Amino acid sequence: MTPILNEVGAVFIPVKNIEAAKEWYCELLGLEAEGDIIAGHLFIVPMNGTGLVLDSKIYTEENVYQTPPFHFDTKDIHAAFSYMKAKEIELITDIENGHWFNFKDPDGNVLMVCE
């Protein structure tokens, strides 16, 4: 039997400015921007399920995600798309196949929302 669990613990996202990224992701997800920045470069976004860690120490332009490393869930793809549009977040696709779209965070990481 393996001591490695068959679950994803967290996904790391490279960010330029940890304070700005903390505020942006918390606002995007409707969370209070509470909690400490760890070691001056890490912020653990309070998530349900798999963790999300913002890390300014690993940021380089080469490390920016060009394809989504994960997706945020939604129960209403059209409402999610409208929400992102209203927040003037850079949408890089329309709603595709009726259930997903891609966008960029302020650091240029390509991310996804999926119903």
Image (tube, helix red, strand yellow):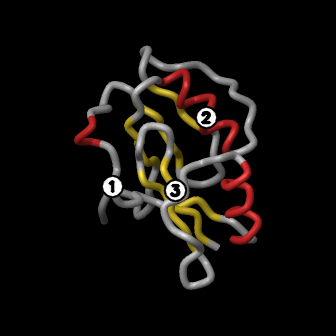
**In the depicted structure, whether residue 13 falls above or below residue 38:** below
Q: Which residue is mark 2?
A: 24
Q: Residue at x 36, y 60 (%)?
A: 67
Q: Which residue carries the number 1 mark?
A: 66
Residue 110: image location, x then y, percent: 43, 54
Q: Residue at x 27, y 33 (%)?
A: 60
Vertical side of 70 occupied by 55: above or below: above
Say which residue appears at 68% left-offset and 55% top-offset.
85
Circle 2/circle 3 CB separation < 8 Å: no
- Residue 111 is situated, as x and y percent measured from the top left of the image, at 48, 56
Query: As shown in the figure, which amino acid type bears the numbered disc 2?
Result: Trp
Residue lying farthest to the top in this orientation: 40
Circle 2: element type: helix
Label 2 to label 3, Cα distance in Å?
A: 14 Å
Q: Earlier in the sequence, mark 2 or mark 3?
A: 2
Residue 17 drawn at (x, y percent): 45, 23
Q: Residue under circle 3?
A: 103
Q: CA distance from mark 3 to mark 1?
A: 11 Å
